[in-house]
C-alpha cells in the first residue's frame, strides 16, 4: 500500500512538473520580451531627448555665431561690440548672459551680467571651455555651472587670420531643457538631462534644487561606461528603478529616463504568480487524480476481497450442506426412535426423563443442522416484505431477556426504513444471534443499539435500488482484524468449547445474502462492534403477510388415526429413517409396507391399493416427487406426502406442486399429524 501511495505521488508530481516547467519557461520568455519592449521604448525616448537637446544647443550656437563675424570684434572695438552683444541677447530671451573670453590671454573680457570693465581671470568652467574649444576648433556645448546661478553654456570660437582669438559663450536658462525633458518623459516617471560632467541640466523631480548639482553615482557610472543602455539605480529620493540612457556623441550630454522598478518587475511578479497558480492548479489536479486512483484501487481491492470471501463461503457452504444433509437424516432417525422409546416407557418416569434429555439434545443438534442448511443455501428462505416495527415489537421482550439486565437495549427505527425484503423468522433469528454475540462481548454490561435507517451507500456489487441498513452496535470488547476477517465462517469461534458454535454470524450472513443484501462488520478493539445488514427496502405498495399463526403444537397425545388400518407405502433410501417411519406408523395402527427405492415402490403399487404414499424426496434414481407422480398415474387420487430435509425446498415445491411435505427431522406426533391430515382431506 505504502509503495503504491508513494509511486502514485511520484506519478502526480510527474504529471504536474511539465505544466509548471511550461508556465515557468513561458513566464521567462514573456518577461524577457516585456523587458525588451520597455527597454527599447525608453531607450528610444532617451535618444529623442538628446536629439532635441542637441537641436536646441545647435540653434543657440547658430544664434551666437552671428556675433563671431562681427567687424567691431575683429577691430577690437569692445564698446561697440558690447552693445551689439546686448542686442543679440535681447533677441534670445532664453539666454541669461553672453560672455567673451580672450583666448590668447585666457581672460574674461566681459560678461553681460556685469557692466563692461577691466578683464577678469577665467573661472574653472571657463578655462575648461576654452581648452575644449581650442581642441575642437568648432562651436561646442559646454557644461552647466553650479548653483546658485546654474546656466547651461554653449561656446563659439572666433578665429582671426587662422588664429583662435576669442571664445564667445552664451549662458542659457536651464528651464529651456526642463521643458524639452517634460515633453519627452512619460508622465509620472523620473527623468533627467545630464551634462558632460554628470551634472543635472534638467530633472523631472526637484528641478529647482537639483539643477547644476552632480547626479547620482549610478548616473555618472553609466555615462562613464558607455553611451547608451539600461542600468539599475536608486534616485536621490530613494526610488529604485531601471533607467535607460543615451549620450549625444556631439554634446556629450545625456538623457536618462527611468522606469519605476515596479513596471519592469511587474511582469516578473505576475509571471511568477501565474506560474505559482499554474503549479497550484496542476498540483490540485494531480492530487485529485492521485486521490481518485487511490480510491479506485482501494475499492478494487475491497471488491476482490469480497469476491474471495464469497467464493470461500460458497465452498464452505457446499461442504457443510452435504454434512448437514446426512446429519439431518441421522437426527430424524434418532429423534424418531427416541420418541418411540419415550412413548413405550410412559409408565417409567426415569426412563422417560432420560429419553426426554436425549430428545432435547437431538433437537439442539437438529437446530444446528438447520442453521447449516440455511448457510449452505439448501434451505430456501421465504423472502418477502417484513415490517421491522412489528419485528422489533415482537422480539424486544425476548431480546432483553437474552442479553440480561446489565445491558441497556435501544431500538431506533427510522419510519422510512420500516419495510424491508427478508424472511421474518430468519431475520428475527439473526437479530437474536447478534444480540447474543453482543452480550458475550459485554460481560460487564454496556449498551446495545439496534437501528434501521435508509442508506444510499450500499455496496457497489449490489444492484441499484433502495436499501435499509439494519445495524446492531455494542460497546463491547471488539475484534482483532483476524477475527473480524473470519467471523462469518461457519464454525469459527473464539469462545470456549460448549459456549460458541461459530454459526451465529454465518446465519446472519446467510439471511443478508438470501434477502438480496450484504453483511458488514466494523469493529475496533475495546471500542465495540457494529454489524450492518444491508437489506433491500420493500416496495412502497408491499403488503406484509399476516403473521402465520404458530404451527399447532404437536399434540402430546397420539392423534387418533382416521382410518385405523389405512394402508401406507413408505419409501426412503435411508434405512434408519425408513424404519423409524414404518414403526411409528405401525404404532399408530396403520398398515405399512416399505421399500428403499422408487422402482420397487411402483411394483408394490401395481400389486396393492394404498391409501397414502410417504416418500423421501432425495433418493438415488427416482426422487420422491417423480415417484409421487408415477404413483398417482397408477392409483389416481392417491395422497402423497414428501419427506424432505435437505433438497432445497424450492425444488421440492416445484416438483410437487400443491403436494404436502414434511420437514426432517420430525417426531412421531408430527408424522402422525401430517398423515392424518392428508387422509382426512381425502375422506369426503
Ligand atoms: P459464536 O458466537 O458461536 O462464537 P459467531 O459466528 O456468532 O459464533 O461469532 C464468531 C466470532 O466472532 C465470535 O466467536 C467472536 O469472536 C466474534 N464476534 C462475533 N460478534 C462479536 C461482537 N459483537 N463483539 C466481539 N466479537 C464478536
Ligand atoms: Mg454467536
Image (cartoon, grey):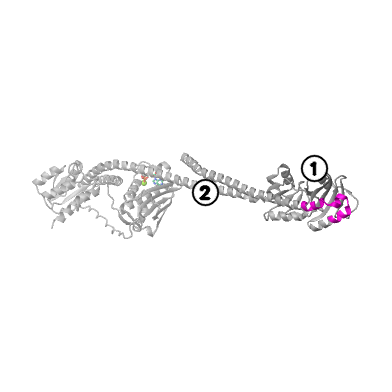
- Quick one: SS at disc 1? helix
Q: Nearer the viewer, residue 397 or 100?
A: 100
**Tag in front: 2 or 1:** 1
Q: Nearer the viewer, residue 572 or 587?
A: 572
Q: Earlier in the sequence, mark 2 or mark 1?
A: 1
For mark 2, what is the residue?
281
Q: Residues within 10 Å of mark 1 (few under 14, many from 20)?
A: few
Q: Nearer the viewer, residue 319 or 218?
A: 218
- Quick one: SS at disc 2? helix
- In terms of image quadrants, where is residue 479? top left
Residue 219: say if magenta: no
**Residue 530 position in % (x across, y down):** 41, 49
Residue 65: say if magenta: yes
**Residue 367 position in % (x across, y down):** 29, 47
For mark 1, what is the residue?
135
The quadrant of the rendered image in which ligand 1 is seen is top left
Residue that extends furthest to the top in the rendered view of this protein: 3
Magenta span: 61-84
Q: Is residue 547 left or right of residue 250?
A: left
Amino acid at each position: 500500500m505504502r509503495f503504491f501511495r508513494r509511486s502514485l505521488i511520484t506519478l502526480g508530481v510527474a504529471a504536474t512538473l511539465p505544466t509548471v516547467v511550461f508556465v515557468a519557461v513561458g513566464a521567462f520568455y514573456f518577461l524577457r520580451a516585456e523587458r525588451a519592449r520597455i527597454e527599447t521604448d525608453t531607450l528610444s525616448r532617451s535618444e529623442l531627448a538628446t536629439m532635441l537637446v542637441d537641436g536646441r544647443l545647435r540653434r543657440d550656437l547658430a544664434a551666437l555665431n552671428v556675433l563671431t563675424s562681427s567687424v567691431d570684434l575683429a577691430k577690437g572695438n569692445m564698446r561697440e561690440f558690447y552693445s551689439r552683444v546686448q542686442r543679440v541677447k535681447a533677441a534670445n530671451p532664453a539666454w541669461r548672459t553672453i560672455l567673451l573670453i580672450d583666448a590668447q590671454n585666457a581672460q574674461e573680457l566681459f560678461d553681460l551680467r556685469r557692466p563692461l570693465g577691466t578683464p577678469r581671470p577665467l573661472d574653472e568652467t571657463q578655462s575648461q571651455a576654452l581648452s575644449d574649444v581650442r581642441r575642437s576648433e568648432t562651436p561646442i556645448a559646454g557644461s552647466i555651472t553650479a548653483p546658485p546661478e546654474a546656466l547651461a553654456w554653449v561656446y563659439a570660437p572666433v578665429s582671426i587670420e587662422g588664429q583662435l582669438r576669442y571664445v564667445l559663450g552664451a549662458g542659457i536658462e536651464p528651464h529651456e531643457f526642463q521643458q524639452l525633458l517634460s515633453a519627452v518623459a512619460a508622465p509620472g516617471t523620473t527623468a533627467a538631462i545630464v551634462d558632460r560632467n554628470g551634472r543635472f541640466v534638467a530633472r523631472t523631480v526637484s528641478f529647482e534644487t537639483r539643477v547644476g548639482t552632480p547626479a547620482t553615482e549610478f548616473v555618472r557610472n553609466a555615462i562613464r561606461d558607455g553611451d547608451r543602455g539600461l542600468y539599475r539605480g536608486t534616485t536621490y529620493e530613494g526610488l529604485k528603478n531601471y533607467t535607460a540612457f543615451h549620450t549625444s556623441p556631439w554634446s556629450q550630454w545625456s538623457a536618462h529616463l527611468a522606469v519605476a522598478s515596479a513596471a519592469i518587475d511587474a511582469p516578473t511578479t505576475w509571471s511568477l504568480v501565474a506560474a505559482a497558480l499554474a503549479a497550484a492548479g496542476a498540483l490540485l489536479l494531480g492530487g485529485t487524480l492521485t486521490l481518485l486512483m487511490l480510491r479506485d484501487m482501494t475499492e478494487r481491492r475491497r471488491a476482490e476481497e469480497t469476491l474471495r470471501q464469497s467464493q470461500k463461503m460458497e465452498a464452505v457452504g457446499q461442504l457443510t450442506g452435504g454434512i448437514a444433509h446426512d446429519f439431518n437424516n441421522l437426527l430424524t432417525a434418532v429423534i424418531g426412535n427416541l420418541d418411540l422409546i419415550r412413548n413405550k416407557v410412559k409408565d417409567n418416569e426415569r426412563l422417560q426423563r432420560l429419553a426426554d434429555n436425549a430428545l432435547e439434545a437431538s433437537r439442539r443438534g437438529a437446530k444446528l443442522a438447520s442453521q447449516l442448511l440455511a448457510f449452505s443455501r439448501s434451505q430456501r428462505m421465504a423472502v418477502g416484505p417484513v415490517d421491522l416495527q412489528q419485528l422489533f415489537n415482537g422480539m424486544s421482550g425476548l431480546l432483553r431477556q437474552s442479553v440480561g439486565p446489565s445491558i441497556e437495549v435501544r431500538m431506533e427505527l427510522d419510519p422510512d426504513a420500516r419495510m424491508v425484503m427478508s424472511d421474518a423468522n430468519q431475520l428475527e433469528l439473526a437479530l437474536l444471534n447478534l444480540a447474543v454475540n453482543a452480550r458475550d462481548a459485554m460481560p460487564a454490561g454496556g449498551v446495545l443499539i439496534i437501528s434501521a435507517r435508509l442508506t444510499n451507500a450500499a455496496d457497489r456489487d449490489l444492484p441499484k435500488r433502495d436499501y435499509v441498513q439494519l445495524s446492531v452496535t455494542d460497546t463491547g470488547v471488539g475484534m482483532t482484524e483476524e477475527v473480524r476477517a473470519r467471523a462469518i465462517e461457519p464454525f469459527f469461534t473464539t469462545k470456549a468449547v460448549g459456549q460458541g458454535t461459530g454459526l451465529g454470524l454465518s446465519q446472519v450472513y446467510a439471511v443478508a445474502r438470501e434477502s438480496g443484501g450484504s453483511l458488514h462488520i466494523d469493529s475496533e478493539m475495546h471500542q465495540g462492534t457494529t454489524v450492518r445488514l444491508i437489506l433491500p427496502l420493500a416496495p412502497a405498495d408491499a403488503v406484509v403477510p399476516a403473521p402465520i399463526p404458530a404451527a399447532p403444537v404437536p399434540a402430546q397425545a397420539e392423534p387418533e388415526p382416521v382410518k385405523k388400518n389405512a394402508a401406507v407405502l413408505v419409501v426412503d433410501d435411508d434405512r434408519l429413517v425408513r424404519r423409524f417411519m414404518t414403526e411409528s406408523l405401525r404404532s399408530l395402527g396403520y398398515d405399512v409396507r416399505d421399500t428403499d427405492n422408487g422402482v420397487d415402490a411402483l411394483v408394490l403399487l401395481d400389486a396393492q391399493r394404498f391409501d397414502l404414499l410417504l416418500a423421501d424426496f432425495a433418493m438415488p434414481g427416482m426422487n420422491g416427487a417423480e415417484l409421487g407422480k408415477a404413483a398417482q398415474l397408477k392409483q389416481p387420487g392417491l395422497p402423497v406426502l414428501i419427506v424432505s430435509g435437505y433438497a432445497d425446498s424450492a425444488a421440492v415445491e416445484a416438483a410437487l406442486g400443491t403436494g404436502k411435505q414434511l420437514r426432517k427431522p420430525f417426531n412421531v406426533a408430527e408424522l402422525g399429524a401430517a398423515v392424518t391430515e392428508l387422509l382426512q382431506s381425502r375422506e369426503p
